[in-house]
Amino acid sequence: MFGVVQSKPVKTKKNINHKNKKISFHFSFKLKRIIIWCCVLIFIFLLIGYYLYNNYYSNYNYIKEDKSQYLVYTMDTSINNQGMHNEIPYINIDSNDARLVNQTIQTYAQSFLKNKNNLIVYNSQLNGKILSVLLRMTDYREGYTFPDITFHTYNFDLDDQTLMDSEEILSLFHVSEAEVSKKIESQLKKYYQTEVDNGYFAAQECDYDCFLSWRDIEDYDYLDSVYYYIKNGSLIAYRPFNIYSVYGEENFFDEESYAFRITK
């Protein structure tokens, strides 16, 4: 009827005294000196690395002909008959490709600037390990009111200091020539429509083909004389064309009109 309650044995508590043991490290004077010198050497190596990076590698001094100059600097200047400054660039890279480009630029400039009305200026930009140089030539032919503007670009891979061709540049941005052609066509059609909207001419009197004819663009060849320039990480195609016509369109276009943005 009644359950049997079994009593549990009483456990006695054992008093265990934990002794606090202090762990101490004893370094010999010789070992301390070694540690200090190791720290000093590491600090020195860090300083040397920082100096080399800021004064040698980050400025690409190790590939320069003249380490006291920028990667691209103005080699020669002059003033044309219109009071504008010519600027002849020098690509300061110690490589065969750079020397060939510099020689080509200098030879061309000497011939082009024999006409004292003409003008050469340049821009350059470093995007990652790609150095881009843009030449703009303005040909003020005698008795010609509106100049003929042309471009040339040079893109250098600073890893091996070689000149990149158009195919390499397009491949770098994963873009085809067909895509470039479409971008240029699209922008030119916008120029045409904007001119019509602004009243430079009526669409009935000058259609898009007429517009291209005045631009001296034949057979829809949008890639003629195209040169590629990398600006702020974007691919820009420079495509020269005539800006003048009987409709006074030279007032519509400016220097940036020749720059067609291919990538964002």
Image (cartoon, grey):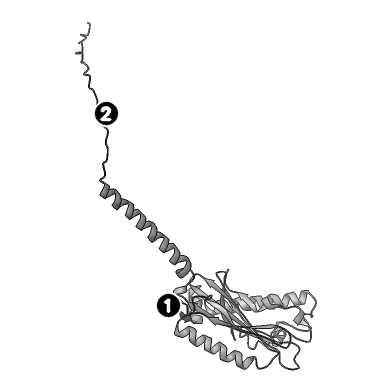
Q: In this view, does 259 lie above or below 119?
A: above
The circle drawn on residue 160 is 1
Sequence-first tag of 2 and 1: 2
Q: Which residue is drawn at 47% across and 73% down?
A: 61
Q: State which quadrant residue 208 falls in.
A: bottom right
Residue 79's spot in the image, x, y percent?
A: 69, 85
Within the image, what quadrant is residue 46 found in? bottom left
User: Regarding mark 2 in the picture, which secondary structure is present there?
Assistant: loop
Residue at coordinates 75% horizontally, 82% vertically from top-left? 250
Q: Can residue 174 be seen in this view?
A: no
- The residue that label 2 is drawn on is 20
Query: Which quadrant does the N terminus fall into?
Result: top left
Q: Is residue 39 visible?
A: yes
Residue, far top: 1
SS state under label 1: loop
Q: Residue 172: where, in percent of width, then height? A: 48, 74
Q: Which of 247 and 53 is in front in this view?
A: 53
Left of 170 or right of it: where is 145?
right
Position in image of residue 173 (x %, y %)? 51, 73
Judge by depth and name the residue closer to the eye, 238 or 212: 238
Residue closer to the observer: 55 or 13: 55
- Label 1: how many residues lie within 10 Å, few (<14), some (14-19) or many (20+)? few
Residue type, mark 1 in image: Asp
Whether tag 2 and tag 1 are in contact, CB under 8 A, the answer is: no
- Mark 2: few/some/many CA within 10 Å (<14, 14-19, 20+): few
Residue 4 disc label: none
Say left or right for 92 vs 209. Answer: left
CA–CA distance between discs 2 and 1?
65 Å
